[in-house]
Amino acid sequence: MFKDLADFAVKYALKKGADYSEARLESTTSNSFILKNGIAEASGFDKINGLGMRIIKNKTLGFASTNYMDKEKIKKLIQNTINTTEKASKLREEINLSEENSYKNKYEVKQKINLNDVGPDEKIKILFDAEKELINTKINIPSRYLSLSDSITTEYLTNSDGTNILATVPKVTFFYLLTVEHDGKTSQRIWQYGQSGGFEFVKKWDIPSIVVNEVEALQNNLKFGIKPPKQTLDIVAAPQVVGIMVHESGGHPYEADRIIGREGAQAGESFITKEMLGTRIGSKAVNVVDDPLLENSYGFYKYDNEGVKARRKYLIKEGIINEFLQNRKTAYYMGIKSNGSSRSVNYDRESIVRMSNTFMLPGNHTEEELIGDVKLGIYMKNFMEWNIDDKRINQKYVGAESYLIKNGEIKGPVTKPIIEITTPQLYSAVDAVAKNMEYHAGNCGKGEPMQAIPVWFGGPSIRLRKIRLGN
């Protein structure tokens, strides 16, 4: 892995006048397979090696990266970075990092079925099996996009504070986009599965069953769905819907770089301010956390990309704004310690404040109990569309597989119920939380250049009282 080059780079940067230096070495091997309408359209077999460096000189941050693992080239890169950073220091955007403990450690996510032991024929066969099962349903599915990919990433992080972390994390991902047509109407679903670990998880997912269940639900909704009621009603949102709600309105607005305006030109800002810590945002039933330590999760890590030890963060505790996601820069700005939320998608991207696995904690009810106490409402099992504004306050979710609830019982399907709501209204409307936890994978986008980073989002089913559906 050229660990000696990373160690050398940190020492050389200090020798050349850097006040702080950090090197992150990455080696990733990946495979991907795409099936579009039954045709194997693309496959990729990639290997990436590279070194990313951050330095601080005159309280100014500099970043550089290279995929040339050559000592002389790295020397030139460091010297150029220091020179550029010194010139930039005249702009006086002062950067400081919070004081943190240093660690020396290594860890690896174990694989029961090693990804390197599974050949491409076996991987692509899973997609062809799924395609065959889709065709056997006799449902009109004019567009079928299936993708299966895997990767193994080894990272070595070292910095001038004395941190040395070596981590190896394999990941598997399944993604699909399916369009169903019936009687001139169409409906579409996009979804993703992802975990850290070996090929055992791909086998566990049972991909052919996943896609068949999806298209059957879409067709049932198209054939028998009715328009949702227009009056005020209750909504029982299932884990997939809760997950995207929490990610977008309970995770992103708690990123400290958004709060201080650092991401304003890229991913947006936040309606939440530093002064709102300790104030109520929702009912006592609402608890939202971000936890990178979930075993085999898609957003798993034990140390972030600044070497800070990972832990669970309680963003909302019993409806109260409790904590923000921090890296060392934002933590210094707010006068606290980092909580290990700095991540980068590749060696050639600077690590920034990111979510890992963000979800609502479970309650004590069953989903059936939530439904049973609804006189008139909607059960929204999943969604086909969502959007939210740049400050993460005004948002919209459009149901895909949804059903009418009448006198505590699930009735027939409902087409495209729309929740249009503000973040405080959303979390204040939660009166009961179930215990049926689920986690779902996604690639969260943020930064400039864009960084689509693996995360889990999820939670249990929740009940929202007195909601008026959008048009």
Image (cartoon, rainbow, N blue to C red):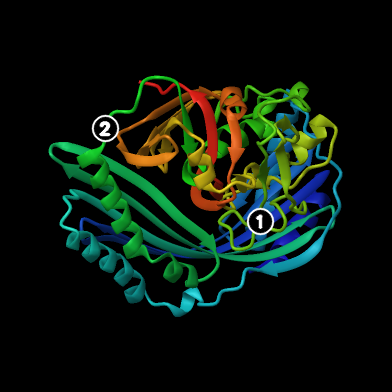
Quadrant of the snapshot with the N terminus: bottom right
**Could you tell me which secondary element the residue under label 2 belongs to?**
loop
Label ID, residue 364: none
* Whether residue 80 can be seen here: no
Q: Looking at the image, is mark 1 or mark 2 earlier in the sequence?
A: 1
Q: CA distance from mark 1 to mark 2?
A: 64 Å
For the residue marked with disc 1, what is the amino acid?
Ile
Where residue 322 sits: x, y (%)? 76, 34
Q: Position of residue 457 (x, y in %)?
A: 55, 46
Vertical placement of 75 versus 390: above or below? below
Q: Residues within 10 Å of mark 2 (few under 14, many from 20)?
A: some
Residue at coordinates 66% horizontally, 45% vertically from top-left?
A: 290
Label 2 belongs to which residue?
226
- Return the residue at label 1: 74
Circles 1 and 2: CB atoms closer than 8 Å: no
Give the percent coordinates (x, y) of residue 39. 21, 61
The location of residue 298, given as percent across then percent down, is 55, 56
Q: Nearer the viewer, mark 1 or mark 2?
A: 2
Taking the view exactly as shown, the residue that stands out farthest to the front is 407
Q: State the residue in front, 79 or 322.
A: 322
Kindly state the secondary structure of the residue where label 1 is placed.
helix
Q: Is residue 303 left or right of residue 384?
A: right
Total count of labels: 2
Residue ranking furthest to the bottom = 117
- Residue under the image location 72 percent in, 30 percent down: 321
**Can residue 130 be seen at all in this image of the molecule?**
yes
Quarter occupied by the C terminus: top left
